[in-house]
Amino acid sequence: MLENIVDGINWLFMIYIFLYAVIFFLSTVYALINLFDHKERERHDNDLYIRNEKNFIPISVLVPAYNEEVTICDCLASLLDLDYPEYEVIVIDDGSKDLTSQVIIDKYQLKETNRPVRRRLHTQEVESVHSARVGNVFLTLARKKNGGKADALNVGLNTARFPYVVALDADSMLLARDSLKQISMPTMEDDRTIAVGGNIKIANQVVIENGQIKKTFIPKNFVVLMQMVEYARIFITTRVWFNQFNGNLIISGAFGLFKKDVIIDIGGYKNKSLGEDMMIVVNIHSFFRRNKREYRISYVPTAICWTQVPSTMKDLGVQRKRWHKGLMESLIEHRYIFLNPRFGWIGFFSYAYYLFYEMLSPFFEVIGFLTIIISFITGFINVQFLMTFFTVYIFYSVIVSVSAMILDFYMMDNQYKFRYLLTFIGLAIVEAFGYRQYNSILRIIGTFEYFRKGHSWGSISRSEHLKTEKV
């Protein structure tokens, strides 16, 4: 009897892994076709038509910051030198306990102003507003009482002057100079587009000076290396595929474009939310589907944002537990979407994917691995089965990760050296064992913390100037 139960668990886990491999294979194939098509369309765009600067919409760039004195000026150096005709930058200091506001005021000579902030969304009190024109860009700093990232973004929405906003994290170290043009293209190609996600890349692998990338290199930090493989797999495959049927449920908080009035109409960002990036997108889907209004949520892999990621296991744990709690929060609150015909592919595929292969996957993976190992030790399965399983698992993991890295290499126009690609092919094998299981354990811990109401934003230490990192 026990042998039959264990055998059943083993085969269910094998089927789970097989379906996961099929999904990633299909998404990788679609991403390959889509990216080639995107490159071809870029070559034939009529510069006098869609890329004429008169056609680009004004954008307000929102940067919520909490205790970011180490990285905030590197972030602003990039943002104030973008290739875009008209935009403003708004930093929202969410009650920082360090010198975040002061370093901005000192560096850019900001002056306190009586500029009114229209309170279309309820927020914590805004204590002061400083501003100045830096080159052709208007820079504003809004200092407020602490209320969390969502509350800070709502202050940014109240302060923004332009019809579209780009939401960033303060650890978004650098936007590619054409990133605003790239991310705003879908709004000009289809006026139903109300939100667009950008591609997130890891800034720990580059040398940044004066807001520009001077050199790329292979980091020596193991935690950063594993995240580079992971990010390529996430941002180059499934999100490109989900884009085809308007099915993306997440726009990364590090870089996303939104129509301001839409965010205000749905009540803004949810205060105390741990996953405001997913929550706001799912709220948009729900609002427009329920009101039977046409809309598009898009994703542009060529709109690049370079962000600083955790470099220690401790900081990685804080981030991943917070991400998983945010995912759970969004899926549980919007559970009515699951298999709901009103939501089409979102209910039958997107929600199901995030439920089974994101929210519940750490439990499937950890229980599956433990069961197979115990089965081998107790003699329920033989060496041949064990070796077959691990061979299949390694093969699918490596193929998916390597395919994503090759696509990333192609998309970046060979900005990376070819030997970098070969290195990451080897890292894809390492990432399949140890790092991925560690992430699963972190997410399981996050699950228990969520049900214990552990809803804190958390903090992650930053590296003080990436340009000084040894290469």
Image: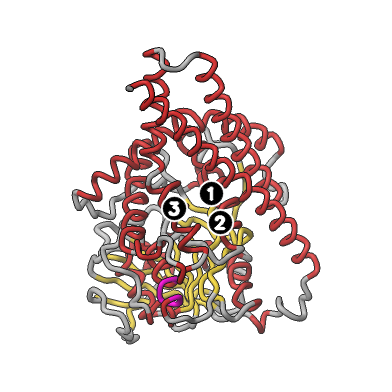
Pick the residue in front: 145 or 181.
181
Q: Which residues are magenta?
A: 285-289
Left or right placement of residue 33 versus residue 282 in this view: right
Residue 285 visible:
yes
Above-or-below relation of 145 to 240: below
Q: Does label 3 or label 1 sit earlier along the sequence?
A: 1
Query: Percent position (x, y) of residue 100?
Result: 33, 61
The amino acid type of the residue labelled 2 equals: Arg
Residue 239, labelled with which disc?
2
Query: Which SS class for mark 3?
Result: helix
The amino acid type of the residue labelled 1 equals: Ile
Residue 277, labelled with which disc?
none
Q: Which residue is mark 3?
A: 354
Q: Which residue is mark 1?
A: 234
Query: Percent position (x, y) of residue 413?
Result: 72, 51
Cα distance in 3D space between marks 3 and 1: 13 Å
The amino acid type of the residue labelled 3 equals: Tyr
Residue lying furthest front in this view? 1
Principal secondary structure, stretch drawn in magenta: helix
Q: Does label 2 or label 1 sit earlier along the sequence?
A: 1
